[in-house]
């Protein structure tokens, strides 16, 4: 019996992906574990392995297809001994639709009214019911208007699309059955149409708060475009990574009460130690150093050891409990031409600085080619974001949930400092720790950044 090969979910939050490349063609034999395709998500490009043995009978989704829904059929596999042509002919001939389109029939079925004895009409033919009619909606179709507190009826797809677009669902006029907000209403709202006027007394200049903590823009796209002369700008559509970054960091800013702690670190001893260690590095067979440590490598190690010294700060917040991590898993921000990603150095507290350095270089290279696996950039206890190479003295970074802190690292520079009553020059570096106040209190955050400062100023303590 033919086996349908489905679009895999490569991470818990994945809903769709791009089928970037087929590594097998129709007629090729495959065995369990063979890499058959490459799938591109918002963060990375990952290889997909075959689960069963057989022959590729038919490819339903050509390479280069974007926004393929998870669990959509992408190919048909003929099992051993099975007629390949028959299996291919018997497989689905309908190409999977993009994720949004694939959900449309399900939404239409949900949004159609359900009289006891009559078939439900299609969504497009449905007319709004009189205001006095009761809306037959499940709990999953009801949300609360963040502005008025009134109940708002909306389909699950419409709620998700409105959240992705940053639009308060309560401001959208619903055209579905019983005034329910449907997909078409959200699409119209994205262009500035079909929005209700703000409630009396409300300030139109203030952003509204959407479900999940996202802030809706005070101006629609059309209103913003109206401020600029056509032809004076280029409109570049957001890719999936940029949308994900915007959604996650907006949610983080709105849901996390954050405070910031800044200290200045003397890099004198670290600079000397780094110079000596790099000079003593062995050579490989090509004569290249086995490692070349950067200041950031020491920063990662120091943060990992500091979390072990202050374990109460090595935590993640959940609504039901505090997760206390046993190891120091440190995310490191890597800038990409198309966005930002934070690969994670696992158990950094037990790794040597040279091992951290080499692993970080390898992760950064794969991040830039979108080859990271989800477990290589998800989770973690804290992160390090370093803009020192750009000459930035200090800055504050946004925490990446579910982490509870992030360390923003500035440049190392010569500054005038007072020692023993004398003004002398010293190489100093400013670092700022952002803390989620739900998980880390002020004194605890101060203890953590003090432990970091002590380690970075005395690097020999990192190996004690």
Image (cartoon, grey):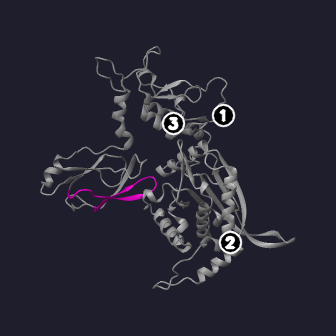
Horizontal side of 76 relative to 276 (left or right) equals: left
Q: Where is residue 63 in the image (x, y as percent from the top left)?
A: 32, 55
Q: Where is residue 77 in the image (x, y as percent from the top left)?
A: 21, 53
Q: Which of marks 2 and 1 is in front?
A: 2
Horizontal side of 323 relative to 117 (left or right) equals: right
Q: Which of marks 3 and 2 is in front?
A: 2
The reply to whether residue 251 is in sight is yes
Distance CA(mark 2)–CA(mark 1): 51 Å
Count of marks placed on residues: 3
Question: Which label number is shown at residue 458?
Answer: 2
Q: Earlier in the sequence, mark 3 or mark 2?
A: 3
Q: Earlier in the sequence, mark 3 or mark 1?
A: 3
Q: Residue at x 43, y 31 (%)?
A: 140
Distance CA(mark 3)–CA(mark 2): 54 Å
Q: What element carries label 2?
A: loop
- In this rendered view, identify the residue nearer to me: 139 or 90: 139
**Residue numbers of the magenta segment:** 33-55
Q: Position of residue 245 (x, y in %)?
A: 53, 50
Magenta span has 37? Answer: yes
Q: Where is residue 307 in the image (x, y as percent from the top left)?
A: 60, 60
Mark 1 surroundings within 10 Å by alpha-carbon count, few (fewer than 14), some (14 through 19), many (20 or more): few
Please identify the residue farthest to the right as the structure is shown.
421
The residue that mark 1 highlights is 205
The reply to whether residue 236 is in sight is no
Mark 2 surroundings within 10 Å by alpha-carbon count, few (fewer than 14), some (14 through 19), many (20 or more): some
Q: Is mark 1 on a helix, strand or loop?
A: loop
Question: Which label number is shown at residue 168?
Answer: none
Above or below, comparing residue 319 to residue 198 in the picture:
below
The image quarter containing residue 427 is: bottom right
Distance CA(mark 3)–CA(mark 1): 18 Å
The residue that mark 3 highlights is 190
Q: Are marks 2 and 1 in contact (CB under 8 Å)?
A: no
């Amino acid at each position: 019996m033919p086996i349908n090969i489905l679009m895999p979910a490569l991470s818990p939050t994945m809903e769709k992906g791009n089928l970037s490349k087929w590594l097998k063609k129709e007629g090729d034999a495959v065995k369990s574990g063979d890499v058959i395709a490459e799938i591109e998500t918002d963060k990375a490009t990952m290889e997909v392995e075959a689960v069963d043995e057989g022959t590729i009978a038919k490819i339903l989704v050509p390479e280069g297809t974007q926004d393929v829904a998870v669990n959509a059929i992408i190919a048909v596999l003929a099992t051993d001994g099975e007629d390949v042509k028959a299996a291919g002919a018997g497989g689905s001939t309908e190409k999977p639709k993009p994720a949004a389109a694939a959900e449309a029939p399900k939404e239409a079925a949900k949004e159609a009214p359900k009289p006891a004895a009559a078939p439900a009409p299609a969504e497009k033919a449905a007319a709004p019911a009189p205001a006095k009619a009761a809306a037959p909606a499940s709990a999953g179709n009801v949300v609360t208007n963040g502005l008025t507190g009134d109940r708002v009826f909306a389909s699950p797809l419409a709620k998700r699309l409105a959240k992705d677009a940053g639009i308060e669902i309560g401001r959208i006029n619903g055209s579905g059955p019983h005034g329910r907000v449907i997909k078409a209403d959200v699409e119209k709202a994205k262009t500035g149409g079909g929005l209700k006027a703000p409630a009396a007394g409300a300030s139109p200049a203030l952003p509204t708060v959407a479900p999940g903590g996202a802030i809706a823009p005070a101006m629609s796209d059309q209103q913003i475009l109206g401020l600029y002369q056509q032809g004076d700008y280029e409109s570049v559509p957001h890719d999936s990574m940029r949308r994900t970054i915007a959604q996650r960091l907006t949610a983080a800013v709105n849901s996390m009460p954050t405070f910031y702690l800044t200290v200045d670190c003397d890099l004198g001893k670290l600079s000397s130690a780094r110079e000596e260690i790099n000079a003593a590095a062995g050579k490989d067979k090509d004569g290249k150093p086995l490692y070349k440590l950067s200041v950031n490598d020491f920063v990662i190690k120091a943060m990992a050891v500091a979390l072990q010294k202050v374990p109460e700060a090595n935590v993640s917040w959940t609504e039901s409990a505090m997760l206390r991590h046993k190891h120091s898993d440190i995310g490191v921000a890597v800038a990409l031409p198309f966005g930002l990603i934070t690969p994670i150095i696992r158990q950094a507290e037990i790794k040597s600085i040279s091992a951290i350095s080499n692993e970080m270089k390898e992760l950064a290279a794969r991040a830039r080619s979108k080859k990271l696996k989800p477990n290589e950039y998800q989770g973690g206890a804290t992160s390090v974001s370093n803009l020192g190479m750009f000459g930035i003295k200090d800055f504050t970074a946004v925490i990446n949930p579910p982490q509870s802190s992030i360390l923003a690292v500035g440049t190392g520079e010569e500054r005038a400092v007072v020692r023993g009553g004398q003004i002398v020059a010293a190489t100093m570096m400013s670092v700022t720790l952002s803390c989620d106040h739900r998980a880390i209190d002020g004194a605890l955050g101060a203890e953590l950044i003090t432990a970091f400062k002590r380690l970075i100023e005395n690097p020999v303590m990192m190996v004690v």
